[in-house]
Image (cartoon, helix red, strand yellow):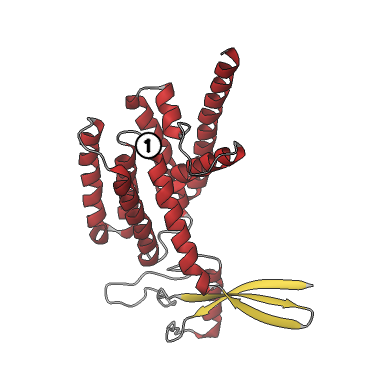
Amino acid sequence: MMKCTITTSPSTGERLRWRHGFALKWVILVDQWGGRRGRSCHEKPLSKSGRTGGAFPRRESVHSRWQARLRGFGYQFAVPLDPMAAPVTALMLVGFANAVNMADGMNGQLLGSAAIWCGFIAYYVGLAPGLPFVAMMGSAVVAMLFNLRGRLFCGSAGAYGIALFIGLSSIAAYRQTIGDLSADMPVLWFWLPVLDCLRLMASRILAGRSPLSGDRNHFHHILMAAAPVRYALPIYLGLLAAPGVAAILNKKSGAVVLVLAILCYAAIVGLSQARRARTSITT
């Protein structure tokens, strides 16, 4: 039989400073393997003098090398996963940028989304590092006011630029928040444009068309067909922000609100498809 395990070890030239023996090292390595970065639940924050307030040392953020160890039939070999990090990250960034560009079809939608995402990042990175994101959030809100009046438009270049900036900033925030921002938190932030992009691509493929072909079946088209922009935009931004806001108030409630938001999204899309089907039958 074959067996696969994934392990992690510190990179070359990087070390953790332990002061309390081998057992503590394994406690924190198991904690890191579980996907939790930064301060462990067994650690206490540093005091102003730079020393820990208890018996456990401060754990520093390090880069780790992940490996998939395969065992079976008397053989054992390791497959390094580090080389996959760059292409997977690039693929996710490109996919997110395209999803944001596809979702940009209603005045105020892109800039409102950017303001929400900048607010989330600023909250997790802290006051001083978050000042640029607070400024970005304010700029996005001001630009959105002109966009709603039809005096300013971002275009595809603006959508791609904002999406890449937000995506790269999220990665940087994850690396620098020392455990306060979990790796799955951006799922609560970016779920709506990504989910709508996947739905559109799947529906186009099932219809025998190119997944990159255009149509008027986007979520913002559905909202604008059901209600004026002054109602459709708050609905979109409210669904987008709800899981992230819930996670700030209570980390465990973020996933619950995400499920509820997805159900609302599915209900709105389903009702729209049913109405289109009835209209096509009657005509």
- Residue drawn 68% across the image and 72% down it: 4
Can you say whether 50 is above or below 274 in the image?
below
Q: Which quarter of the rendering shows the N terminus?
A: bottom right
- Residue 230: x %, y % from top left: 32, 26
- Residue 249: x %, y % from top left: 41, 46
Query: In which quadrant of the rendered view does residue 193 lie?
Result: top left
Q: Residues within 10 Å of mark 1 (few under 14, many from 20)?
A: some
Residue sitting nearer the eye, 237 or 86: 86
Can you say whether 240 is above or below 251 in the image?
above
- Residue drawn 20% across the image and 40% down it: 142
Q: Which residue is mark 1?
A: 237
Can you say whether 137 is above or below 235 in the image?
below
Say whether residue 189 is visible: no
Q: Is residue 261 left or right of residue 49?
A: right
- Residue drawn 34% across the image and 59% down it: 169
- Residue 89: x %, y % from top left: 46, 62
Residue sitting nearer the eye, 203 or 55: 203
Disc 1 on helix, strand or loop?
Answer: helix
- Residue drawn 48% across the image and 32% down it: 217
Q: Which quarter of the rendering shows the C terminus?
A: top right
- Residue 198: x %, y % from top left: 52, 44
Q: Amino acid at mark 1?
A: Leu
